[in-house]
């Protein structure tokens, strides 16, 4: 969208007038909440490196007959006081349509910008609007499967899509894509400066189709062109290992739909090998589905409260564990750090409060709000913060995080020896010695 137009729209909606409308729309609250969103995936926001350049306004004024550049949208007739207040929006938009010199965006773009501007007035980064293409990507990710090239990506400070890691034996790895590569173009279209999910949307596509990436690689004097054949892939959300010292290791990367089933399978695998204890690694886990965090917690707990969900009106709902699960007796340590958020904090908080496990590592992220998702008529999605959650001992985690029982800071880069993991080492030591 043209930057001036977007700024006009956002300016109009950013005022207290629209805030009144928003408050009225959400005043009734919502009942059960299903999604917890971590800081990185989600809420989806424009990449901080994406910018719009404003064009300076002319200093001189021209008095002449104005010829409208398009047919103005008729201003709706207000039927109540709130609609009458909102007339200011239509008043501004009508004037822009009649007087703006330049190409106007279509009403869909204006509507999306207006919604984003409105939500900014709530001052809650987790209440978020996602356009259809972004909503589709997140919906697919939540299933644990997708069609694409098989890589984890992020956006760097220069607005370039960086390949963080490639799936082992996945299409990207087979085609020669490496971790650290930066994608400049997708099928000849530049993606430098676009949002993360816009870039992902261009790279993904049906299995057995090709996508050509223009790659910038450190040490290479010129960009590389690599063609990757997409495939149907399962997101590798878990890592399992039986160590030589008899300690089982499980790392869970997120709480998407398969999380509890994969964790249960991992526990059964390790217990079949007579594991002496389990290190459950939730470091860097941004969260995901609330029901998955409850089910994963239940694998280790035989009864009692797992988490309490509480709304602004004081009503609450308690989620409790049931007996008979596979991991209820095995000695357990949970690894956490500043990237452990949302659903990961539900699990860690429940196991810590119930004295089922000790936490080792660093202070967690502190994301304890619950977002309820709404799929809108055009396929876009709205996620609304509707409740906060609390640990079994009624600790509020939002904005505070969980403090580990044994704090082990990650060493500074200059002090860290590649291939070592002092936090994991401390967890293993605790399981082997009890202290």
Image (cartoon, helix red, strand yellow):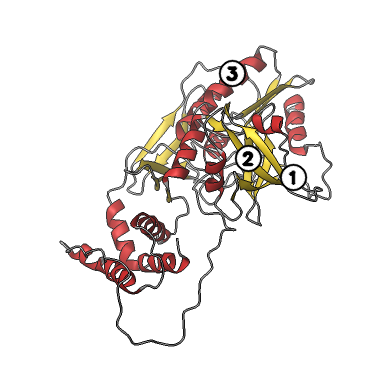
Residue at the far top in the pictured view: 272
Q: How many marks?
A: 3
Q: Residue at x 46, y 86 (%)?
A: 59
Q: Residue at x 30, y 72 (%)?
A: 68
Question: Residue under circle 3?
Answer: 265
Between marks 3 and 2, how big is the CA–CA gap? 37 Å
Secondary structure found at label 2: strand
Between marks 2 and 1, how big is the CA–CA gap? 38 Å
Horizontally, residue 407 falls left or right of residue 74, namely: right
Between marks 3 and 1, how big is the CA–CA gap? 30 Å
Horizontally, residue 203 falls left or right of residue 174, namely: left
Q: Tag 3: Cα neighbours inside 10 Å, few (<14), some, or many (≥20)?
A: few
Q: Residue at x 70, y 17 (%)?
A: 275
Residue nearest the observer in this picture, 106 or 155: 106
Q: Is residue 365 above or below residue 167?
A: below
Secondary structure found at label 1: loop
In which quarter of the view is residue 240 placed?
top right
Question: Residue under circle 2?
Answer: 212
The location of residue 334, given as percent across then percent down, is 64, 33
Q: Is residue 282 visible?
A: no
Question: Residue under circle 1?
Answer: 410
Q: Is residue 306 above or below residue 160?
A: above
The location of residue 354, given as percent across then percent down, is 54, 31
In which quarter of the view is residue 91 placed?
bottom left
Secondary structure found at label 3: helix
Q: Is residue 214 visible?
A: yes
- First along the sequence among labels 2 and 1: 2
Residue nearest the observer in this picture, 293 or 136: 136
Cβ–Cβ below 8 Å for labels 3 and 1? no
Mark 2 or 1: in front is 2
Q: Is residue 269 above or below residue 170?
A: above
Q: Tag 2: Cα neighbours inside 10 Å, few (<14), some, or many (≥20)?
A: some
């Amino acid at each position: 969208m043209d930057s001036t137009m977007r700024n006009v729209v956002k300016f109009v909606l950013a005022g207290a007038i629209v805030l009144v409308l928003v408050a009225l729309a959400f005043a009734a609250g919502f009942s059960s909440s299903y999604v917890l969103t971590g800081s990185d995936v989600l809420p989806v926001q424009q990449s901080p490196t994406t910018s719009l350049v404003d064009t300076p306004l002319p200093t001189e004024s021209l008095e002449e007959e104005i010829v409208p550049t398009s047919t103005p949208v008729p201003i709706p007739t207000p039927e109540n006081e709130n609609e009458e207040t909102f007339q200011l929006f239509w008043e501004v938009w009508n004037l822009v349509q009649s007087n703006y010199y330049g190409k106007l965006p279509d009403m869909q773009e204006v509507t999306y910008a207006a919604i984003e501007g409105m939500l900014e007035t709530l001052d809650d980064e987790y209440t978020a609007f996602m356009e259809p293409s972004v909503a589709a990507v997140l919906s697919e990710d939540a299933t644990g499967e997708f069609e694409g090239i098989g890589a984890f990506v992020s956006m760097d400070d220069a607005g370039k899509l960086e390949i963080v890691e490639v799936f082992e034996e996945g299409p990207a790895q087979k085609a020669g894509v490496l971790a650290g590569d930066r994608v400049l173009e997708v099928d000849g279209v530049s993606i430098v400066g676009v949002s993360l999910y816009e870039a992902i949307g261009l790279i993904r596509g049906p299995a057995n189709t090709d996508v050509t990436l223009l790659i910038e690689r450190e040490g290479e004097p010129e960009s590389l062109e690599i063609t990757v054949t997409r495939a149907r892939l399962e997101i590798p959300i878990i890592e399992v290992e039986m160590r030589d010292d008899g300690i089982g290791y499980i790392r869970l990367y997120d709480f998407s739909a398969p999380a509890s089933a994969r964790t249960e399978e991992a526990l059964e695998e390790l217990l079949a090998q007579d594991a002496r204890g389990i290190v459950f690694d939730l470091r860097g886990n941004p969260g995901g589905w609330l029901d998955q965090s409850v089910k994963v917690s239940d694998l280790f707990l035989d009864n009692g409260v797992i988490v309490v969900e509480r709304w602004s009106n004081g009503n609450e709902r308690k989620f409790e564990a049931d007996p008979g699960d596979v991991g209820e007796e095995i000695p357990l340590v949970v690894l956490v750090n500043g990237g452990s958020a949302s659903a990961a904090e539900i699990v860690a908080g429940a196991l810590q409060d119930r004295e089922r496990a000790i936490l080792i590592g660093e202070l967690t992220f502190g994301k304890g709000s619950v977002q309820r998702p709404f799929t809108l008529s055009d396929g876009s999605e709205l996620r609304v913060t509707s409740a906060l959650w609390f640990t079994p001992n009624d600790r509020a985690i939002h904005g505070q995080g969980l403090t580990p029982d044994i704090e082990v800071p990650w060493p500074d880069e200059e002090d860290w020896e590649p291939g070592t993991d002092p936090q994991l080492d401390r967890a293993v030591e605790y399981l082997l010695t009890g202290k």
